[in-house]
Image: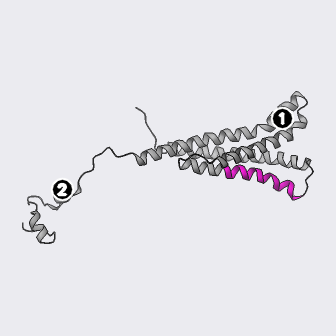
Amino acid sequence: MRLRRPGAAALIKWSAAAALVAGVAVVAWISYLHAVDVIRWAGESGAIVYVYPVTIDGLIYVASMVMLDCARRGESSPVLARTMLVLGIGATVLANFTAGYPYALSFRGAVRLWVFCWPAPVVILMYELMMMLVRRRAAASSTSSTAPSSAPVADAAPMRQQRARAPGRRAPSTAAAASNGGARVGP
């Protein structure tokens, strides 16, 4: 016999969401710093250096939220959202790779390059795992809300008549009740 705890599904969902948020925050910060280095290396200066990386992360965030909304509603993600997510992730991987590339001439540098590029795939995998939970929950809720009930629907009229009878009394006749506006007639 399998026991189910009522709050287990919510605990799984919320703990996975918390882990995703924490992981994304760390990876976003790392990728942001790498992008700032690359943009500065490319010759930009001033506020552009610090604002430009936000466009990459903003693109990833908006595309992810569109896909999450579609998953919650049980719909497939729009091609534009998937394309923008791939473009944003590609820009992040490129920035991370470019930030680590100058160190890649030795074995230690190659490991460092791998470490620089690691955050983007981690976020992708964490996000996809979370989307699996959301899609599974959306599919379960849509099948449970659209499935017909297997229990027969009881007619309410006989139950009302039975409640109207007092112990030891008989039910009013239909003709007498109808002629009296539905009020009880007789003993």
Task: Report, in whole angstroms, how far the alpha carbon at label 1 lies from the one at label 2.
Answer: 77 Å
Question: Can residue 111 be spotted in the picture?
Answer: yes
Classed neighbour count for the residue bearing mark 1: other residues with Cα under 10 Å, few (<14), some (14–19), many (≥20): many
Look at mark 1 in the image and give the residue it sits on.
Answer: 113
Look at mark 2 in the image and give the residue it sits on.
Answer: 158
Start and end of the magenta stretch? Answer: 45-63
Quarter of the picture holding the N terminus = top left
Residue farthest toward the bottom in the current orientation of the protein: 180
Residue beneath the point at 59% across and 51% down: 69
Instruction: Locate residue 100: give its quadrant.
Output: top right
Viewer-proximal residue among 4 and 99: 99
Q: Secondary structure at mark 1?
A: helix
Residue farthest toward the front in the current orientation of the protein: 79
- Look at the image and say whether residue 17 sits in the magenta stretch: no
Q: Is residue 185 left or right of residue 96?
A: left
Tell me, for residue 79, which label it has, or none: none
Q: Secondary structure at mark 2?
A: helix
Viewer-proximal residue among 145 and 86: 86
